[in-house]
């Protein structure tokens, strides 16, 4: 059967808005058809995008130019063999046959007559297709022809074969073939047509905000503001049909078309819209009401059979009800066997709200059971169980909810897991629940609701007989207590199992892992952390033979190194951990902590090797710590002068973060990014980033200390020394309170010293420098020592300044801290020039100038440039990128490194220091945009390069 456009299940299309592109193409195709040029166009898109309205416009234009129009709309569920083909061809000359109807046009509202055809036809031969195509060819020879098929994806397969057959043979015929199909439909013949070279496929776009404004003007004559347009766009996703219905509903209710009104409508005034939906629904047969309610419970796209079973009606009754709901404009795609959806979320909400609470809960319970019985996913079943408290506590339902909660935890969605698990635990019944269930619930609640987590875990702990479950409960409970600042109770819990380790699955090893987790958990609360450090011994003599022992060793070492306690022992412990085994045998979290020991011991190149290994790993446990790992890796790269890498890593760490709502976990990557932007001289970006972060910093978390340091540095660059000094002093106070007294942990003291100098306080700057140098020397912190000596030199007389800077440069030799080394060189060159050693100054400044440029440190490069000019030098601006940017020495080193030679071998061969080789390679990587040696071989082999870095 063929259904005319505009039938009971095809609501009137919306006005054409923002369809100039499509209409222009239609005009071109229609105008050239009488000249004997064929055309083929396919309209694709979702329901409501306006395909039927566009087809009507095409038909109207074709008739206006005298084309003969044959049009049909295929209706799913009534697809007799060649039904669509007969409807199209019956009105053409030479096609009349017994019992065939005359083709009807788009404006013709008469129902189509049934077509006579052989119902036993299973396939159509090539000869039949050729004869039917001949009908089209002979008709076109008399009059230019438009063949239009709406909903072509629902045509019978034989008719689609004919359309594909004709589409391939249009050349030379004055025929325009226009087909409409729905996105995602399964019609191979239609897909084949779209692949033809002659086919123009049009996919109408959703409306823009301006388009919605124009639509509202055409429908109501009223002008709308931008706020309304954007709100309507958000509510309808630019679907013209949905937007049309929403605007007409508002207009019918005499509600103003404003953004504020539409926002309110979604909460209160749409009750009128919902009431209209409900009144319309209750006028229908009981089976239709039941079907609508079942569909609302199950949601868009649910299988017809499932909806029918939930509605307690047979399949035929449900299909009829679906057609009725489509004709009422409540459902799109209301065809038997096809997909369907409510025309708007408000329609579904109105139908659901019409159900009494107890009936709705019971319906969700039955839906859950039906989905479970057909093998639906646990999460889909659990969504319904959460809305049916009585069903959720049944044994089978509890099993499903727990399975769904585990899936949610694996996907880092503890909030969803908590929702599922709380449905299994009725209020006041926690004491009677399965201890395993309570432990799962308490674990999911740990970060979201620590008090509830402690309550549920405590209730389960003494009742579980499983050692594995007991360890999970103890571990999570201790963590939750520490995060609440209740470290005394947490360590009481630890002591209980330390005295009787047999209660835990791995005995002493479980106790060690528990202590390691507790030490790290305490770092989220400053008061708890200080109490912990006053009572807990940090023994670093553990051999690290087992994974739990290595975890505990890492936790102790990172605390020790941060507070300047046995730094050398901490480094040795970290190296034992990172050198013994990889992430497959260790927790990635504790390997990250061990790498941070190296970072805080001024060994960023060693730390970076571990961070890179972890980032490149595939262990799924890594995903939960990935942002923090990326931030730490970026900090190591910034310290080494790899500024591009630092920016890339912080961007990845902050992906998806709303800076205005940044938390402690975001503070570290934000801080590193701000430092790096300042290193590169991107002041505008730095100021924009800082302006988006909340101020003042209220959190006492240690990560925010680093943000205060970075912000103080920014204010110093803005020549606001007083506010810079205030930020940096506050950072220092907080660092002291956290016992983060190691000068290699944070550079706050260096920038505070610079701020003291900016306000004319040399004594304050020297005091900070001397303290940092003394601590760095005692712990052999070479980067901190070089930085402290540079700051000290800034407060000294010129002759002493040169001596201090020479010592600083010696301290930095071999550290790979390229940016810091360049900064010291520039400072030494300026000091030499001040003493009158112009030639020596020029040589040192040129080195610093080149190294700063290679690193992309624009502010330092500009300082060096001005200093060079002051010595009488006239430096050329170096080439920044590519092979031509390489100096002769850089190209020489790069070629040897690409051949697999070690830095030591290259240095010995070229009679230079290893430090010189490192500097050259860093410059090569930057100029060639490489990340390391692995990419260098390919880059050097891709071009024939002479010793000066130029192509032969």
Image (cartoon, rainbow, N blue to C red):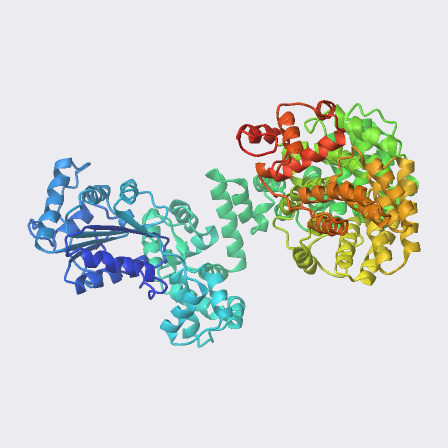
**Quadrant hosting residue 562:** top right
Is 555 situated above or below 194?
Answer: above
- Give the number of marks: 0
Residue 883 is situated, as x and y percent measured from the top left of the image, at: 58, 36
Instruction: Look at the picture and state if 164 lies above or below 284.
Output: above
Depth order, front residue of 31/299: 31
| Residue 433 appears in the rendering | no
- Pick the front one: 459 or 233: 233
The image position of residue 295, as x and y in percent, is 43, 53
The correct choice, above or below, for 376 with respect to 91 in the image is above
Which residue: 76% across, 38% down?
817
Residue 215 appears in view:
yes
Going 61% across and 45% down the picture, which residue do you hit? 393
Q: Is residue 271 above or below residue 867?
A: below
Q: Is residue 310 rendered to the left or right of residue 411?
A: left
Question: Nearest the camera: 531 or 775?
Answer: 775
Drawn side of residue 135 relative to residue 589, left or right: left
Q: Where is residue 885? Give x, y as percent.
A: 61, 39
Q: What percent of the width, then of the height, locates residue 83? A: 19, 47
């Amino acid at each position: 059967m063929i259904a005319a456009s505009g039938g009971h299940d095809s609501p009137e299309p919306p006005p054409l808005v923002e369809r100039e592109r499509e209409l222009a193409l239609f005009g071109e195709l229609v105008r050239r058809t009488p000249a004997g040029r064929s055309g083929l166009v396919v309209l694709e898109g979702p329901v409501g995008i306006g395909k039927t309205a566009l087809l009507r416009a095409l038909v109207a234009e074709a008739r206006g130019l005298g084309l003969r129009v044959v049009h049909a709309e295929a209706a799913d569920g009534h697809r007799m063999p060649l039904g669509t083909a007969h409807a199209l061809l019956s009105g053409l000359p030479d096609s009349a046959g017994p019992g065939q109807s005359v083709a009807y046009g788009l404006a013709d509202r008469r129902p189509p007559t049934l077509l006579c055809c052989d119902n036993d036809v299973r396939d159509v031969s090539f000869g039949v297709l050729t004869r039917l195509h001949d009908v089209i060819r002979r008709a076109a020879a008399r009059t230019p022809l438009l063949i239009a098929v709406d909903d072509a994806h629902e045509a019978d397969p034989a008719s689609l074969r004919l359309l594909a057959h004709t589409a391939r043979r249009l050349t030379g015929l004055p025929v325009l073939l226009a087909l409409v199909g729905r996105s995602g439909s399964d019609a191979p013949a239609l897909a084949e047509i779209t692949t033809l070279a002659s086919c123009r496929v049009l996919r109408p776009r959703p409306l823009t905000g301006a388009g919605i404004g124009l639509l509202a003007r055409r429908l109501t004559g009223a002008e709308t503001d931008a706020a309304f347009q954007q709100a309507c766009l958000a509510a309808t996703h630019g679907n013209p049909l949905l937007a049309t219905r929403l605007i007409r509903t508002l207009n019918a209710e005499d509600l103003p078309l404003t953004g504020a009104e539409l926002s309110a409508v979604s909460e209160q005034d749409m009750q009128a819209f919902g009431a209209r939906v409900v009144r319309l629904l209750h006028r229908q047969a009981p089976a239709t009401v039941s079907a609508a309610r079942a569909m609302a419970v199950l949601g868009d796209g649910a299988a017809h059979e499932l909806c029918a079973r939930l509605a307690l009606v047979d399949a035929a009754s449900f299909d009829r009800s679906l057609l009725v709901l489509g004709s009422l404009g409540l459902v799109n795609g209301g065809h038997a066997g096809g997909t369907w959806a409510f025309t708007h979320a408000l329609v579904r909400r109105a139908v659901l709200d019409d159900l009494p609470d107890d009936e709705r809960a019971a319906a969700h319970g039955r839906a859950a059971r039906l989905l479970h019985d057909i093998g639906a996913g646990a999460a889909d079943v659990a969504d319904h169980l959460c809305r049916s408290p009585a069903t959720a506590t049944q044994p089978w339902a509890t099993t499903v909810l727990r399975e769904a909660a585990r899936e949610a935890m694996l996907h880092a969605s503890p909030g969803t897991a908590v929702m599922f698990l709380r449905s299994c635990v009725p209020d006041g019944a926690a004491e009677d629940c399965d201890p395993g269930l309570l432990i799962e619930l308490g674990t999911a609640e740990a970060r979201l609701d620590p008090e509830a987590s402690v309550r549920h875990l405590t209730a389960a702990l003494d009742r579980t007989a499983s050692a594995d479950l007991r360890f999970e409960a103890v571990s999570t409970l201790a963590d939750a207590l520490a995060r609440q600042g209740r470290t005394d109770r947490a360590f009481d819990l630890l002591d209980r199992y330390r005295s009787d380790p047999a209660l835990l699955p791995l005995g002493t090893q479980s106790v060690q892992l528990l202590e390691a987790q507790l030490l790290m958990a305490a770092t989220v609360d400053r008061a708890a952390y200080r109490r912990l450090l006053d009572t807990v011994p940090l023994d670093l003599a553990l051999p690290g033979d087992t994974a739990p022992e290595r975890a505990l060793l890492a936790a102790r070492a990172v605390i020790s190194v941060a507070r300047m306690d046995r730094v050398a022992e901490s480094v040795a412990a970290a190296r034992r951990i990172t050198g013994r085994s990889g992430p497959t045998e260790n927790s990635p979290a504790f390997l990250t902590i061990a790498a941070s020991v190296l970072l805080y011991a001024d060994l960023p190149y060693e730390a970076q090797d571990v961070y890179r290994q972890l980032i490149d790993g595939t262990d799924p446990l890594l995903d939960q710590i990935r942002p923090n790992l990326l931030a730490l890796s970026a900090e190591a790269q910034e310290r080494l002068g790899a500024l591009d890498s630092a920016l890339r890593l912080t961007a990845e760490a902050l992906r998806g973060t709303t800076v205005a709502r940044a938390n402690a976990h975001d503070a570290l990557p934000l801080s590193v990014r701000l430092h790096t932007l300042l290193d590169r001289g991107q002041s505008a970006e730095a100021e924009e980033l800082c302006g988006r972060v909340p101020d003042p910093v209220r959190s006492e978390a240690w990560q925010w200390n680093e943000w205060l340091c970075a912000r103080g540095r920014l204010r110093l660059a803005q020549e606001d020394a007083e506010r810079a000094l205030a930020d940096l002093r506050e950072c220092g106070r907080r660092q002291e309170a956290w016992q983060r007294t190691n000068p290699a942990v944070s550079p706050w003291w260096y920038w505070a010293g610079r701020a003291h100098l900016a306000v004319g306080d040399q004594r304050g700057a020297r005091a900070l420098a001397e303290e940092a140098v003394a601590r760095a020397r005692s712990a052999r912190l070479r980067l901190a020592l070089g930085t402290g000596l540079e700051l000290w030199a800034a407060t000294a007389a010129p002759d002493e300044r040169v001596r201090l800077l020479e010592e600083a440069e010696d301290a930095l030799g071999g550290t790979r801290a390229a940016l810091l080394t360049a900064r010291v060189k520039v400072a030494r060159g300026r000091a030499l020039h001040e003493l009158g050693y112009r030639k020596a100054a020029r040589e040192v400044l040129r080195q610093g100038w080149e190294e700063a440029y290679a690193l992309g440190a624009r502010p330092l490069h500009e300082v060096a440039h001005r200093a060079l000019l002051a010595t009488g030098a006239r430096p050329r601006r170096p080439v920044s990128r590519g092979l031509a940017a390489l100096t002769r020495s850089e190209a020489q080193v790069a070629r040897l490194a690409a051949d697999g030679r070690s830095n030591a071998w290259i240095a010995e061969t070229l009679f230079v220091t290893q430090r010189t080789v490192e500097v050259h390679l860093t410059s090569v990587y930057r100029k060639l945009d490489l990340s390391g040696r692995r990419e260098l071989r390919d880059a050097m082999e891709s071009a024939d390069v002479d010793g000066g870095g130029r192509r032969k």
